[in-house]
Image (spheres, grey):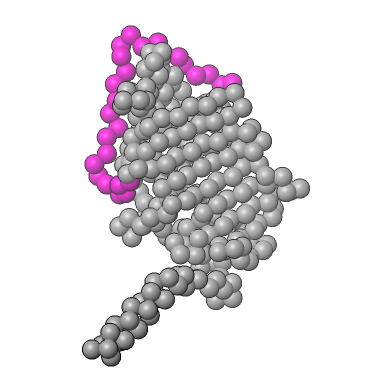
Amino acid sequence: MSRLISIIFTVVLIAMVFSCSPAPRMVLDTDRVTPAQLVRDVELNHSKKTSLRARGSLSIESRDFANSGNFNIDMQHPDSLLLRLRGPFGINVGTVFLSQRDFLFYNSMSNEVIVGEPRNDILRAFLRMDIGVNDIMDLFLGSSRNLFYEPRRPDEYKIDGDQYLLIFRSHGSIRRYWIDPRFRAVSRIVYSSIDDRPLLEERYDRFTEIQGMVMAQTIRVISHQERASFSVSYSRIDLNTNDLSFSYSIPSNAKVIEWTEQ
């Protein structure tokens, strides 16, 4: 009996030791994993995502403005996006429709609708930062295509903490891309001036895998020059679904404002 107790005690002790041991650290190797392989994996994951239906919270902050709320989104990448904004108790506070040709924002609180072409100036007025239509579509999909347009070989390729870091210098700027080795996804991008002053930053966090596709559940864009930020946090995500809706209605008595070039 005492021998049986001894064996049980030993087994329990071993189990406790292993359960308390830290998870094995992933070993990053810049010799075995090339920049081309990383970029190819990131691009493959991005190209798999063709549509999005999701809900979550959104916040916009700048030096003179701050607002936040919940939203539902339907998006067919890279063609159209419909964002329904909701305040406390699910109250509808606005609707945003964005495509390659049209922009519409309906403010239900003021009963005003702004329409125009999706130029950078109209997007800047709402997000307080310079950003284009394709950038917005990519951001809501939890990634950025800018890495794919960089030269094949970075100027620097190294390990930074638990991430791969690719650095490109050209065209009067410096671009840094951090890639999560577990998900092969871009986790952070910093665009800097040639004297290395940060201008724009993108952060992607809380990665999850959905039907073989990696998706960031938290996204943040920071304009260091404008001291502005745009953040998205998803509570539910459906990728590549056919159950999309781009229908919306505007009251007939809404005031229509045509956006002209600023």
Magenta stretch: includes residue 257 = yes
Question: Against 156, is 110 above or below?
Answer: above
Q: Is residue 220 left or right of residue 216?
A: right
- Residue 123: x percent and y percent? 51, 29
Classified by dominant secondary structure, the portion drawn in magenta counts as loop
Image quarter where the N terminus lies is: bottom left
Which region shows up in magenta?
237-262
Residue 53 in which image quadrant: top left
Query: What residue is drawn where x is 51% and y is 42%?
Result: 220
Query: What residue is drawn where x is 63% and y is 66%?
Result: 158
Query: What residue is drawn where x is 30% and y is 47%?
Result: 238
- Visible in this render: residue 237? yes
Question: Against 239, is 163 above or below?
Answer: below
- Residue 26: x percent and y percent? 50, 71
Residue 161 in which image quadrant: bottom right
Query: What residue is drawn where x is 28% and y is 90%?
Result: 3
In the image, farthest residue toward the bottom = 3
Question: Against 134, is 215 above or below?
Answer: below
* Residue toward you, 122 or 20: 20
Q: Is residue 228 left or right of residue 15?
A: right
* Residue toward you, 163 or 48: 163
